[in-house]
Image (spheres, coloured by chain):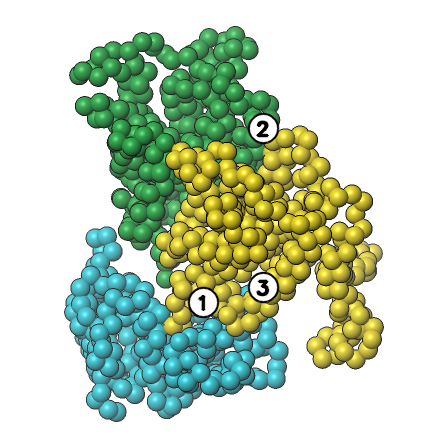
Chain colours: A yellow, B cyan, C green
């Protein structure tokens, strides 16, 4: 007698389909649990970790989560593969750093200005790539941070190799944490909302089949521009935040780390889910910190993981968890 | 049938490398008619469609719709003027449901203009259109991702996508290709209904017999040139056409 | 005159750097972001063979180039082949591999100035009133030799012709019995070899550092973008344009302007003619 593995939806999932979700308390709890776990988990995380060092790591993880959100959004929902996370962090960081250092503008203004201003600048530079084939965007977005860093270094502007020290920082660790955590949560759910709204539907259509979208009287370049603007804003926010976290901006804000890490986080957590990359960031950030002692080996480590995951096309953590939550497996006889 | 010209093509030339895909093609499409375009493989039919709808720029020639010059405009601009097209190999959005597929054209500026922003819920409008085109409203089909559809449904989705744009003209690029005979039989009344509702249609087709059931006039192309233009009953008798298809002298 | 000669040298250098990348892209549409890594791999391995293992210079060079070519081909055969056809994944995968290699060197301490390859011929010569070292002249010579041999190879040998065939029309070549995978492996091996040859003639001009790897990548891609991805003549055009502009900028404004020139040219190219100087516009738009 042969047996095979069968995967079925759990009873409770079937009972909570559609309108029936609110028919019982248990049903509601089932549907709401993952979301509640995510939100509450993120918010209480800083309170349950042992040391302040760990709390710092959480802030870093948050910033990487922002970058991972951008990558997932642009790549899997709009079809724009953005390898330039570092471009956003660099531009955002330098703008807020310059505003703060040269004109003494306080954090409360530099961060929003850097976010929007940085988004404008980044979008402008990436604009020429939008009407042409995707690979150009990928290449150019990857090159920009490398080039910008070298230009700043070569011309010795904006602090040159030494960077701009002595920036204002946040009052204390709690502000650092509880300013960014709600932002992450808001952005995650905000983006989720956008992609299921009609505007997001058009973006996803552009990813699926851009010629058909053009034949439907939609200017895809304009839509892509808006998507890139949104993405760069989030990325620049991360950069600006980082500037005031360390009180310093330098060429390292353009480091390839910021381009590679979000990709790794997305692949680990599950691309196309928006929540997955956030989780992936929170997994990889501590790992990355723990490996910091090894210096560049850390980068080697997660480049190899990334290469491995991409090459052997894994789906990611979140889809796996979702499957386990909604379905169960059992052996049946054939 | 009115004599108002909805589409005017004059002297269009297009070469790819050394190959003349379209050579000195001129014709008019009149309001309310169904114009069929037939011709052996490689006669330039699809290239002509791509040129008219803006996906390919002609080397020479002019194209007008309702008197307005559209040569060189981009595809989304031409669609905005009311000319919708289907693709020979259907181009749905596989990750989206049929309903959401239609949300895309409903989001266009043309729709916003023609409805003054008072379209209402796009999903509902999409369902209406799908029903018109043959999807049953309450079944699961409209909500399944387009990647699961059969060719027949995909072709209908193509038409639905055109209709959502509220076009005055639809250009169909081999809409019957890939369909079984029974699927074609159900598609024909849909197209007839479109004409009755006032839409002008240009059909590039390979399946001549089915096309002749629908077309008011037919244009024949061969090697990029127009070799005949007449009513179907005359085309079947034409020696030139026979020669093009069969090589018979 | 100074500018003319050094401009030429710079252009040839850029062309050499870009040739490996362009070859791989032209044949298999794969943007090989590990190009820079392979370049310094040859450099370091030659150095290792020369200074730690004690093989003579020529032997070290040949051995290194061979090994890295095999590595390049292997990278395709065992890793990149799994993501073939998905350009985004290809870029990410080759980039990750490249970074892994380069950062591995950084971890091992290969960042200082101590690593150098000796020039083939020491000393300089007075050419038309300009003092120029033999190594640089050698570079021009090697560059020309490579161009000629590549031309001969792709026009007169079976393997070379199949590379060109695939570059022009993948499906037609497949129908003629040319296997795209095998050709891609060969292309990647050759691309690595080209990177290697460039490395051994150019590196003696300076030091071998990890930074060089990134610079090579940037410059190679810049040349291809400006000249046109997928076009051989484009590589030369792009290299000449960038090469001379860089030297001009250095002469008029200062050495650090080289990178600014690169950035400016990329932006200008993308705005005015995204397909590059000699690229084919058709390639860039999606087919209907």
Q: Are marks 2 and 1 on the same chain?
A: no
Q: Quadrant of residue C226?
A: top left
Rendered position, A220 above or below A267: below
Q: Secondary structure at mark 2?
A: helix
Q: Which residue sits at x=44%, y=11%?
A: C57
Query: Are tags 1 and 3 found on a single chain?
Result: no
Estimate the x, y position of residue B148 in percent, counting from the top left: 57, 68
Q: Are marks 2 and 3 on the same chain?
A: no
* Residue at screen point 79% across, 61% down: A328
Please give the chain letter of the residue carrying mark 2: C
Viewer-nearest of discs 2 and 1: 2
Badge nearest the viewer, 1 or 3: 3
Does C245 sit above or below residue B174? above
Label 1 sits on a secondary structure element that is loop
Number of the front mark, 2 or 3: 3
**Can residue A161 be seen from the camera position used here?**
yes
Q: Which residue is mark 2?
A: C104
| Mark 1 crowdedness (10 Å alpha carbons): few <14, some 14-19, many ≥20 | some
Query: From mark 1 to mark 3, how far is it between C-alphas?
Result: 26 Å
Q: CA distance from mark 2 to mark 1?
A: 45 Å
Residue designated by label 1: B91
Q: Is residue C243 visible?
A: no
Q: Residues within 10 Å of mark 3 (few under 14, many from 20)?
A: some
Q: Chain of mark 3?
A: A
Question: Which residue in the protein does label 3 denote?
Answer: A191
């Amino acid at each position: 007698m042969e047996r095979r593995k069968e995967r079925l939806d759990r009873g409770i999932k079937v009972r909570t389909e559609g309108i029936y979700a609110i028919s019982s308390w248990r049903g509601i709890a089932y549907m709401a649990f993952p979301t509640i776990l995510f939100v509450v988990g993120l918010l209480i995380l800083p309170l349950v970790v042992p040391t302040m060092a760990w709390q710092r790591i959480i802030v870093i993880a948050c910033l990487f989560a922002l970058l991972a959100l951008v990558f997932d959004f642009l790549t899997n929902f709009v079809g724009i593969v953005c390898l330039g996370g570092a471009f956003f962090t660099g531009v955002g960081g330098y703008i807020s750093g310059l505003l703060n250092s040269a004109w003494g503008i306080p954090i409360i203004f530099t961060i929003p200005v850097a976010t929007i201003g940085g988004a404008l600048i980044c979008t402008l530079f990436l604009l020429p790539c939008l009407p042409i084939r995707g690979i150009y965007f990928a290449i150019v977005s990857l090159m920009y941070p490398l080039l910008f860093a070298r230009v700043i270094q070569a011309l010795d502007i904006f602090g040159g190799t030494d960077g701009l020290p002595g920036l204002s920082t946040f009052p204390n660790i709690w502000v650092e944490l509880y300013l960014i955590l709600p932002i992450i949560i808001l952005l995650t759910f905000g983006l989720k909302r956008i992609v299921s709204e009609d505007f997001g539907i058009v973006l996803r259509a552009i990813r699926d089949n851009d010629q058909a979208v053009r034949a439907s009287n939609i200017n895809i370049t304009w839509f892509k521009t808006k998507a890139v603007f949104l993405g760069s804003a989030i990325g620049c926010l991360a950069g600006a935040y980082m500037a005031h976290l360390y009180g310093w901006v330098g060429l390292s804000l353009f480091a390839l780390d910021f381009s590679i890490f979000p990709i790794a986080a997305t692949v680990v957590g599950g691309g196309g889910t928006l929540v997955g990359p956030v989780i992936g960031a929170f997994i990889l950030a501590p790992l990355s910190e723990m490996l910091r002692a090894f210096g560049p080996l850390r980068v080697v480590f997660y480049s190899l993981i990334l290469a491995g995951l991409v090459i052997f096309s894994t789906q990611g953590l979140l889809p796996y968890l979702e499957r386990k939550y909604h379905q169960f497996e059992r052996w049946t006889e054939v | 049938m009115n004599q108002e010209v909805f589409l005017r093509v004059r002297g269009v030339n297009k070469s790819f490398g050394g190959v003349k895909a379209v050579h000195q093609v001129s014709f008019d499409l009149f309001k309310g008619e169904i114009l069929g375009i037939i011709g052996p493989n490689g006669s330039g039919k699809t290239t002509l469609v791509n040129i008219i709808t803006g996906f390919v720029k002609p080397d020479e020639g002019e194209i007008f719709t309702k008197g307005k010059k559209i040569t060189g405009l981009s595809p989304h601009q031409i669609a905005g003027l009311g000319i919708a097209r289907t693709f020979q190999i259907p181009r749905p959005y596989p990750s989206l449901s049929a309903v959401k597929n239609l949300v895309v054209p409903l989001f266009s500026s043309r729709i916003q203009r023609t409805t003054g922003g008072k379209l209402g819920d796009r999903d509902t409008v999409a369902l209406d259109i799908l029903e018109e085109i043959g999807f049953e409203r309450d079944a699961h089909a409209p909500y399944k991702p387009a990647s699961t559809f059969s060719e027949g449904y995909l072709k209908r989705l193509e038409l639905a996508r055109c209709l959502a744009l509220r076009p005055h003209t639809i250009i169909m690029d081999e809409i019957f290709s890939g369909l079984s005979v029974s699927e074609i039989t159900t598609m024909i009344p849909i197209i007839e209904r479109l004409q009755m509702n006032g839409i002008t249609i240009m059909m590039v087709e390979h399946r001549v017999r089915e096309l002749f059931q629908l077309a008011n006039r037919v244009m024949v192309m061969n090697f990029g040139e127009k070799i005949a233009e007449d009513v179907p009953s005359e085309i079947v008798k034409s020696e030139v056409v026979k020669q093009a298809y069969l090589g018979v002298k | 005159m100074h500018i003319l000669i050094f401009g030429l040298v710079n252009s040839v250098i850029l062309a050499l750097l870009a040739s490996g990348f362009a070859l791989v892209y032209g044949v298999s549409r794969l943007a090989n972001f590990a190009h820079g890594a392979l370049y310094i791999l040859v450099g370091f391995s030659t150095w290792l063979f020369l200074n730690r293992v004690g093989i003579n210079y020529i032997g070290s060079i040949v051995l290194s180039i061979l090994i890295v070519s095999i590595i390049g081909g292997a990278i395709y055969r065992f890793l990149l082949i799994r993501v073939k056809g998905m350009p985004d994944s290809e870029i990410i995968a080759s980039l990750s591999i490249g970074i892994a290699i380069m950062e591995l060197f950084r971890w091992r301490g290969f960042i200082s100035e101590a690593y150098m390859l000796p020039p083939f011929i020491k000393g300089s010569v007075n050419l038309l009133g300009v003092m120029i070292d033999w190594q640089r002249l050698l570079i021009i010579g090697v560059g020309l030799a490579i161009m000629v041999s590549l031309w001969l190879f792709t026009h007169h040998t079976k393997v070379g012709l199949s590379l060109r065939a695939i570059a022009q029309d993948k499906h037609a070549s497949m129908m003629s019995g040319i296997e795209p995978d095998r050709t891609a492996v060969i292309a990647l091996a050759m691309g690595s070899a080209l990177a290697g040859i460039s490395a051994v003639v150019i590196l003696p001009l300076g030091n071998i550092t990890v930074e060089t790897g990134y610079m090579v990548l940037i410059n190679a891609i810049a040349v291809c973008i400006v000249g046109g991805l997928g076009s051989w003549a484009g590589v030369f055009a792009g290299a000449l344009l960038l090469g001379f502009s860089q030297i001009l900028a250095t002469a008029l404004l200062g050495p650090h302007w080289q990178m600014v020139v690169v950035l400016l040219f990329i932006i200008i190219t993308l705005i005015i003619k995204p397909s590059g100087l000699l690229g084919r516009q058709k390639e860039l738009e999606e087919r209907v």
